[in-house]
Image (cartoon, rainbow, N blue to C red):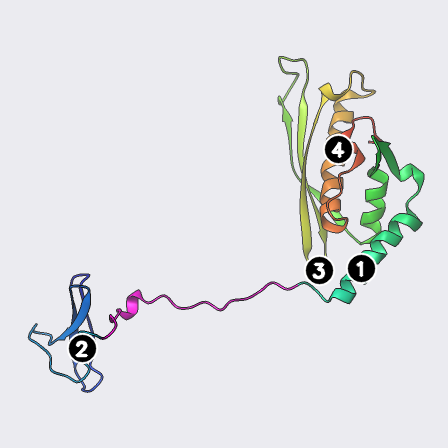
């Protein structure tokens, strides 16, 4: 059996017929190859018959809809109320002409929204010592998650010892800064609309 022929059931009899493609159209034949005279035979002007194993099933079209607008509006209003009522001046820092939330603010966000987190991976480059530029860096991935809903978000960050000329405890402080950036990013993406944290822009924040 070639790709230009296939067997099927005759619509008007308890027997099999063979459909053969010729010049782009399908014609019925008896199994032995002789012309089939059954009423199911297509006329030359009928649409092409496609073998059932070549027919692609149609998939239902589903549109992803947002939640109830009133509920969403109330939720976002709570976010804004949180910023104005529970965050203090110490929870943000002004960089340029804009205020950015610090580590303490994102920890409050996590507490208010019952968000937990975990380090998924950490990497030091180089693994030991320093590179040719007399520096090293950490790359850390943190996952923030909300158990009641199952929602989660992953934050990835990098911090380098070259970002400051002087560290109080260089190894610890670079790792801590990187972890703070990754954790704040994960929490921000999960509950705060993806805001950039102060520590992402400056190594001089509260780590």
In this rendering, does residue 176 appear at all? no
Q: Position of residue 155 (x, y in %)?
A: 68, 41
What type of secondary structure mainly makes up the magenta span? loop
- Of mark 3 and mark 1, the one earlier in the sequence is 1
- Of mark 2 and mark 3, the one earlier in the sequence is 2
- Of mark 2 and mark 4, the one earlier in the sequence is 2
Mark 2 and mark 4: Cα distance apart in space: 72 Å
Q: Position of residue 6 (x, y in %)?
A: 19, 69
At x 20% / y 87%, what residue is drawn? 12
Q: Residues within 10 Å of mark 3 (few under 14, many from 20)?
A: few
The circle drawn on residue 149 is 3
In magenta stretch: residue 54: yes
In the image, taking residue 66 as reference, residue 53 lies left or right, namely left
Q: Position of residue 108 (x, y in %)?
A: 85, 46
At x 80% / y 59%, what residue is drawn? 75
Image quarter for residue 34? bottom left
Which residue is identified by label 1? 75
Mark 3 and mark 4: Cα distance apart in space: 28 Å
Q: Is residue 101 above or below residue 79?
A: above
Q: Is residue 107 above or below residue 49?
A: above
For the residues bearing labels 3 and 1, Cβ distance under 8 angstroms:
no
């Amino acid at each position: 059996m070639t790709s230009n022929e296939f067997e099927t059931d005759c619509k008007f009899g308890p027997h099999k017929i063979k459909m053969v493609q010729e010049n782009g159209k399908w014609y019925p034949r008896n199994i032995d190859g002789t012309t089939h005279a059954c009423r199911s035979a297509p006329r030359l002007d009928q649409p092409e018959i496609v073998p059932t194993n070549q027919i692609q099933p149609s998939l239902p079209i589903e549109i992803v809809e947002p939640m109830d607008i009133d509920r969403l509006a109330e939720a976002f209003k709570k976010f804004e109320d949180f910023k104005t009522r529970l965050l203090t001046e110490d929870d943000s820092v002004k960089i340029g002409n804009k205020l950015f939330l610090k580590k303490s603010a994102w920890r409050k966000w996590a507490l208010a929204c019952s968000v937990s987190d975990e380090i998924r991976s950490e990497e030091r480059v180089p693994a030991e010592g320093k590179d040719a530029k007399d520096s090293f860096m950490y790359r850390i991935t943190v996952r923030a998650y909300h158990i009641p809903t199952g929602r989660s978000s992953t934050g990835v960050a990098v911090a380098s010892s070259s970002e400051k000329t002087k560290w109080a405890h260089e190894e610890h402080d670079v790792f801590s800064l990187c972890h703070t950036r990754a954790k704040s990013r994960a929490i921000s993406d999960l509950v705060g609309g993806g805001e950039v944290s102060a520590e992402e822009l400056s190594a001089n924040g509260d780590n």
